[in-house]
Amino acid sequence: MNATASHAGPVTPRTSIRRVYEALRHASAAERHLRGVSPGPGELTYPQVRALAALANQQQLTAGELARSAELKPATVTALLDQLEDAGVLRRTRSTEDRRVCMVSLTHAGRELVQRRYRAWQEHWTRRLADIPDEDLETAARVLNEIAALYEAAPDELSDGD
């Protein structure tokens, strides 16, 4: 920590920064709630949708790669793969290079399901954010990206330098 920063008094955040922080906490809580919602019979859970969306961006992934890409725990992905394979949404095949490795890919039905869900989610966002001007949305995106960078740098920036 530099000398100037170490002698500075307590920092009082601007009201607007506090409001952004509170809005982000609210959004994070809403996403956590969404992760725990039990859908109706035949519906996908939020973690399942995240995994399928990650798979849709790749031809195939290992279970570990899928967990990282979908930001899910490996144990969650293992159970999720069993359910989605039973439903005919994805398939697992052994790697030809290393039989210990299992590759995961979407079936044709899985790709169609992801496309339907993506369109529905896109329509929902478009409808809900229709009254917000594009320049405000661009500002929001810039601020959210800066917050992500703030979180990623926090361990280094908040250390005592020991």
Image (cartoon, rainbow, N blue to C red):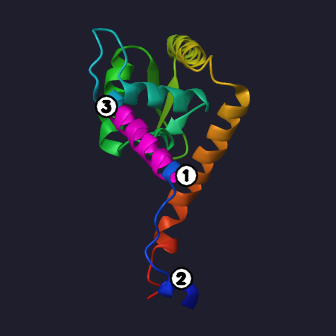
Q: Is residue 40 left or right of residue 132?
A: left
Residue at the spot of label 1: 148
Q: Residue at x 50, y 16 (%)?
A: 110
Rendered position, 77 above or below 107: below
Marks 2 and 1, how far apart at CA: 23 Å
Asked whether the viewer can see residue 42, the reply is yes
Residue at the spot of label 2: 5
Q: Residue at x 58, y 45 (%)?
A: 144
Marks 2 and 3, how far apart at CA: 38 Å
Q: If the image is split into quadrants, where does the C terminus sit?
A: bottom left
Classify mark 1: helix, strand or loop: helix
Is residue 24 highlighted in magenta?
Answer: yes
Residue at the spot of label 3: 33
Q: Amino acid at mark 1?
A: Ala
Main SS of the magenta segment?
helix
Q: Amino acid at mark 3?
A: His
Q: From which residue to which does the magenta span run?
A: 17-32
Classify mark 2: helix, strand or loop: helix
Residue 48 appears at what percent x and percent y? 39, 26
Quadrant of the rendered structure where residue 31 is?
top left
Residue 47 appears at what percent x and percent y? 38, 30
